[in-house]
Amino acid sequence: MNQSDGKSVAWLDRRTGYLELLVEERRDAVLDVLAPYLAPSPSSVAHRALRPEDDLAGNRPGDALRTKVDELAPGFWRWALARLTGRRLEADSWRAGLAGERRVGGELERLARRGWRVLHSIPLAGDVDIDHVLIGPGGAFCFNTKCHRGARVWVGDDSVRIGGQSYPYVRKSRAEAKRASAALTSACGFPVEVRPVLAFVAVADLKVVPSLRDVRVLQEPDIAAFKRLRTDWRPDKVESVYAAARDRHTWVRP
């Protein structure tokens, strides 16, 4: 790929999907032009063999929470009484979580044009799920999304404090990423490191202790910065890991 003055800025091997960027300052322009050629790869053909019920690519952000909200939805009179008395219903907290996952999911999907792949509401054994898994040029990440509207949040090495209460969000994020790493490594046949991300939505203030380095903590607008994140993951590796991640059986193996 050349500039108008004839200077080479990148070259792409369409057979393997390998992209070499020669001028770093032109990265975004190169990715925009080559986006139609970066998505397909020989390994992605494997997706087509998945049965629709086993393909997680169709999951939308918050699907698991949507089911929970529907189960807990109160009848009209119970809902009306709660609103009149100002009492919160159990479904309200689940509904807030659903809104948070949808907002984070929308931001993650914006990264697709930069060569990233994203999956949502990944079901695990034990009736739990991973909110989002992001796979792309910067590696693989497991997102744990939390919506605490207007709250002041303090994040320590192992826990989170909000309004005088402590939550095990940091430990849970680590555990989910470890579980995702094991599942994808087993499915791919090569080591896949998945790094944990704790994403907060609609909080008033977020403070993170400097000593916390293994879990990335951010707010919804910070997700856009992932488009500049790069490792040695080539497009063919991204597609291989994504192919394994979108298969439901990858996540429910013993």
Image (cartoon, rainbow, N blue to C red):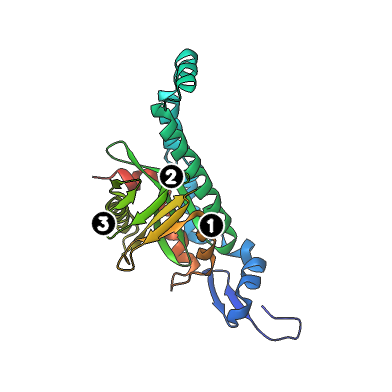
Type of amino acid at the residue the image marks with label 2: His
Q: Earlier in the sequence, mark 3 or mark 2?
A: 2
Q: Residues within 10 Å of mark 3 (few under 14, many from 20)?
A: some
Type of amino acid at the residue the image marks with label 3: Asp
Of 73 and 50, the residue lying toward us: 73
Q: Residue at x 56, y 60 (%)?
A: 39
Residue behind mark 1:
221
Q: Quadrant of the N terminus?
A: bottom right
Q: Is residue 238 visible?
A: yes
Residue 17 placement, left or right of 162: right
Type of amino acid at the residue the image marks with label 1: Pro
Q: Secondary structure at mark 1?
A: helix
Give the foreground label among 1 and 2: 2
Q: Earlier in the sequence, mark 1 or mark 2?
A: 2
Marker count (numbered): 3
Q: Which mark is residue 158?
A: 3
